[in-house]
Amino acid sequence: MSGLTAEQRGDLAEDMLPVAAHLAVLVHGDGGPEDIQEVLAGLDDAQRNALIVVLAGLVDPEQPMGRALGWLDFNENGALTVPHWGEHRPVRDLAAVPDPDCGSEYVDPVAVQRFVDGYPVNVSDAELLVALEKCAGRGMSLRQVDQLRRLPKGTTANAVNRLRKAYTRAGRELPSVLRSGKKQTDFTAAQVVEIREKYAAGGVTDLELSMQYGRSRKTITSLLSGVSYRDAGGPIRAPRGPKPKEVSRAGLNGRTGPVPAVGVARAS
């Protein structure tokens, strides 16, 4: 920008504000490297790219525009103007970032299963939530999902945080197993009986029940076996018996005592 006049610098700064605000939102938790790369791919000046990234990293999207962006206004003489301190809207409002399609309900079960199994796969936001529910049902944390998929620490948590904000703006809530900071309520006695009767009827696994009721598989397993909610009612799953021990060959042959040796003729 050193070769530009003061007026050109002012015009360029004004043109770049929406892009910088968009990047600020992404850098501060609403997106990831792919989102940033998509924005930068539309720019053809390497120095401009660097300037935008630096600016985005320094701007707090929640601070008032008057404080964060006012110093980037130039007057007709190329001089910086004093910020308008009365502008209280956050920088985030300047970034026209479309929310994910929260209403899209189509989920590819194959893509979800590949995600859960740790294979490289592109998933939609809806598929990501279902996959993370399955991972939570297996007792996995978001950090463990990062490890499973060989992602940098915090990648999955950032994605969930981005979706949480989008769902909040759309008046929706994430699945209960992905809501942070909220202690899940205990099951009622009626719910316990319902879950136990569903399992007793057959055709459903602990994991499937955990997905239906938004709890971890460990919670459902404890409920079914009576470790928790023992007095709530409903059929309690019988404990699994011990693994069968090795049976002696004598027992298999119906004999007692040592197994008779088998004579082997030797050549003289």
Image (cartoon, grey):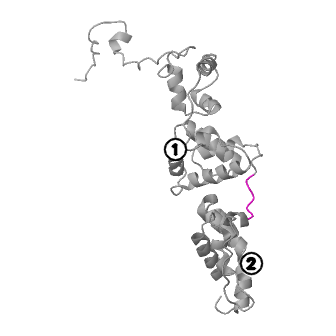
**First reached walking from the N terminus: tag 2 or tag 1:** 2
What distance separates the C-alpha of mark 2 from that of mark 1?
42 Å
The answer to whether the residues at label 2 and label 1 have Cβ atoms under 8 Å apart is no
Q: Which residues are magenta?
A: 95-100
- Direction from residue 1 to residue 186 in the image, left or right: left
Which amino acid type is marked by label 1?
Ser
Q: Could you tell me residue 245's position as x and y percent? A: 37, 18
**Looking at the magenta stretch, what is its main secondary structure?**
loop
Q: How many marks?
A: 2
> Which residue is at the front of the view, 241 or 250?
241
The residue pinned by badge 1 equals: 141
Classify residue 204 by image quadrant.
top right
- Give the number of the disc on residue 15: 2
Query: Is residue 37 among the parts visible in the rendering?
Result: no
Classify the position of the N terminus by image quarter.
bottom right
Q: Position of residue 29 (x, y in %)?
A: 60, 59
User: In front here: 54 or 84?
Assistant: 84
Task: Give the quarter of the image for residue 179.
Answer: top right
As displayed, is residue 5 above or below residue 113? Answer: below
The numbered dot on residue 212 is none
Judging from the image, what secondary structure is the residue with disc 1 in?
A: loop
- Look at the image and tell me whether residue 219 can be seen: yes
Image coordinates of residue 173 in percent, x first then y, are 68, 43
Is the residue 77 above or below the residue 44 in the image?
below
Please, what is the three-letter code of the amino acid marked with disc 2? Asp
- The residue at the point 61 percent across, 40 percent down is 133
Q: Residues within 10 Å of mark 2 (few under 14, many from 20)?
A: few
